[in-house]
Amino acid sequence: MEIRCECGKFRAKLKAFPNNTPGRLVCYCDDCQRYLRHLKRTDLLDANGGTEVIPAYPADAEILHGREHLKCTRLSPNGTFRFSTACCNTPVANTRPGEPWAGFLRCVYTTGEDAHKLDRVLGPVRSRIMGRYAQGIPPVGTPKKFDLRAILTVMPFMLKGKLLGKSSPSPFFAEDGVTPIAVPHVLSEVERQALLG
């Protein structure tokens, strides 16, 4: 599966997709919403402010072209490392050093001319979380934070990734495993508050 930004200057590939993914997940948290507002990409939020991600292991991802176009944002000093492109403001992935998780946003998955291929391969959304931050009323069954379904969807993926050492090498961090390949812009509290919905 190829990953690419909207304009195509950044491209990456996933070497073990879709076998090693928990599938389609939607997060309604305020941080995900703030991040897309920061990028001026609210067009990628669903009707209730949700962000769809399809996780993969960092070790299964490889940048093919356009690494120089990646930029990194953190919503707070301890926040998730959120990578997007400077060329066309496409959010690419959310991750942390040492974790077997790279949450690639749905918009970067390419399926060629078959727009519904990904839906057929992965099926429907498997889990939704953080409904307390949703705009309006989220889909029926969305928990306010997390629920057992969300945990059972993600934990086997995380545990398998830990056991198999799938957190590294990560294309988003240097050889030391902790230094991001793009210097993070950490939002100030004033910037964060300005992004409230």
Image (cartoon, rainbow, N blue to C red):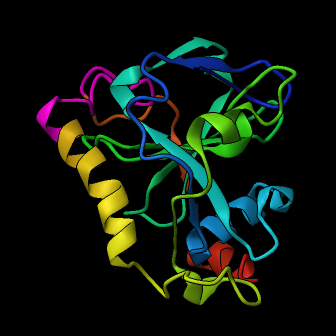
In the image, taking residue 28 as reference, residue 110 lies left or right, namely right
Would residue 23 be visible to someone looking at this image? yes
Residue situated in front as seen by the camera: 152 or 53:
152
Q: Which residues are magenta?
A: 162-176
Would residue 85 be visible to someone looking at this image? no
Image height of 168 relative to 186, above or below:
above
> Quick one: which residue is furthest to the left in this view?
163
Q: Residue at x 64, y 55 (%)?
A: 52
Q: Quadrant of the C terminus?
A: bottom right
Q: Residue at x 82, y 62 (%)?
A: 42
Quadrant hosting residue 21: top left
Query: Any magenta on residue 175?
Result: yes
How would you classify the magenta stretch by its main secondary structure?
Answer: loop
Quadrant hosting residue 15: top left
| Residue 143 screen position, x and y as percent | 49, 84
| Residue 152 screen position, x and y as percent | 30, 62
Query: Any magenta on residue 169?
Result: yes
Residue situated in front as seen by the camera: 149 or 46:
149
Q: Quadrant of the N terminus?
A: top right
| Residue 190 screen position, x and y as percent | 65, 79
Q: Residue at x 83, y 33 (%)?
A: 115
Q: Residue at x 12, y 36 (%)?
A: 163
